[in-house]
Image (cartoon, helix red, strand yellow):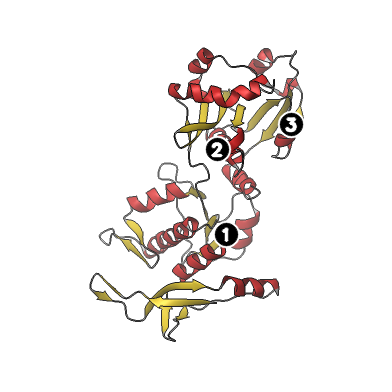
């Protein structure tokens, strides 16, 4: 199901019969899956000339998963090693690709091409920690090749089911940076924001937002940037400790393909979650179905925080939708549906 090639001589070292992935027979694997067969790969790969090469198992898994554009790559940790937050000592269950990259860089790890991992041997790491960092390295390699998510779970009974079917999971989930290009707005973005939302204001989908008011509230706005242009925007307002309103969510018409609206909305949801918000609400007059499809449900004005009830426009009669969130794992599960 795959062929290999030699690593060759690198930095004066002859790796002899240590090999790397050359080609994955994607269609053969898919035919086996279509026949309800399970494909088990050994670490021995054959070259076109008939030579046998030993391929690192984690490198092989990452390469095959990437070639197959798999939804998930799952590694078993060797000793059940788990990452913990330095300040709170709480287990770290999720990492974004860029966060994982920084973690590896800080600890002296890097992937050399697609065949080996380089790390700082002067850092005296325990065996389980070293193995976990290696798996994070290969997880990042797979994500860069198109895999959506990588999991590192402990080798214990029920850990796989717990990871896949419970909210908190049992191990570490690493996912791609779906939010590349999204950042907090600055005053210089206001003309771009106005250009994006103007068509919807003219269509009476959005309430007009004067530039001077936007400037006062600029810290509550976020923008989606492409080629230095504002192609989308959204606003988050926090009310008290538990409520947040997401509004002014717009992607320019010519950029609405490719899930950018979901990405921007997911980014804003995560901001709310990290701020301790448990209830997100939106007001809408014409895009109700979009929010219903994303886990919101309709409520009355009385469900809003009191300060927001006072400013609710009863003449416009916007419908109100609410969504409860508990942690980022809930949002991770929703992203699988994008």
Quadrant (top left/top right/bottom left/bottom right) for the N terminus:
bottom right
Does 315 sit left or right of 307 as displayed?
A: right
Q: Which residue lies furthest to the left in this view?
A: 12
Q: Which of marks 3 and 1 is nearer the N terminus?
A: 1
Where residue 285 appears, as percent x and y from the top left, is 73, 24
Q: At numbered mark 1, what does the secondary structure look like: helix, strand or loop?
A: strand
Q: Which of marks 2 and 1 is nearer the N terminus?
A: 1
> Which of the numbered marks, if any, corresponds to residue 203?
none
The residue depicted at 66 percent of the width and 13 percent of the height is 311
- Disc 2 vs disc 3: which is toward the camera? 3
Tell me how far mark 3 sits from mark 1, CA to CA. Answer: 32 Å
The image quadrant that residue 39 belongs to is bottom right
Q: Mark 2 points at which residue?
A: 267
Which residue position holds label 3? 288
Q: Can residue 306 be seen in this view?
A: yes
Residue lying at 47% horizontally and 27% vertically, measured from the top left: 185
Element marked by disc 2 = helix
The residue singled out by tag 1 in the image is 72
Looking at the image, is mark 3 or mark 1 nearer the viewer?
A: 3
């Amino acid at each position: 199901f795959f062929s290999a090639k030699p690593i060759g001589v690198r930095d004066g070292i002859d790796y002899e019969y240590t090999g790397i992935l050359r080609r994955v027979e994607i269609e053969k694997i898919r035919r086996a899956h279509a026949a309800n067969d399970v494909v088990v790969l050994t670490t021995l790969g054959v070259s076109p000339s008939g030579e046998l090469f030993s391929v690192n198992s984690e490198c092989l898994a990452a390469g095959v998963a990437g070639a197959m554009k798999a939804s998930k790559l799952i590694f078993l940790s060797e000793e059940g090693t788990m990452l913990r937050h330095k300040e709170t000592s709480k287990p770290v269950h999720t990492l974004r690709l860029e966060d994982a990259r920084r973690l590896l860089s800080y600890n002296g790890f890097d992937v050399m091409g697609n065949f080996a991992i380089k790390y700082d041997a002067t850092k005296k790491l325990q065996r389980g920690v070293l193995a976990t960092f290696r798996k994070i390295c290969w997880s990042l390699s797979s994500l860069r090749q198109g895999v959506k998510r990588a999991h590192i779970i402990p080798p214990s009974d029920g850990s796989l089911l717990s990871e896949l079917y419970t909210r908190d999971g049992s191990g570490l989930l690493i996912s791609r940076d779906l939010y590349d290009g999204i950042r907090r707005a600055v005053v210089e973005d206001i003309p771009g924001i106005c250009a994006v939302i103007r068509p919807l204001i003219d269509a009476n989908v959005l309430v007009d937002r004067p530039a001077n008011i936007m400037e006062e509230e600029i810290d509550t706005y976020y923008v989606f940037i492409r080629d230095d242009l504002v192609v989308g925007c959204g606003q988050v307002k926090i009310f008290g400790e538990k409520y947040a309103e997401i509004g002014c969510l717009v992607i320019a018409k010519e950029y609405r393909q490719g899930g950018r609206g979901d990405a921007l909305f997911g980014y804003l949801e995560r901001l709310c979650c990290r701020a301790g918000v448990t209830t997100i609400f939106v007001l809408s007059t014409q895009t109700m179905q979009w929010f219903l499809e994303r886990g919101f449900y309709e409520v009355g004005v009385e469900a809003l925080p009191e300060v927001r009830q006072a400013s609710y426009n009863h003449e416009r009669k916007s419908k109100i939708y609410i969504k409860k969130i508990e942690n980022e794992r809930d949002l991770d599960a929703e992203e699988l549906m994008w």
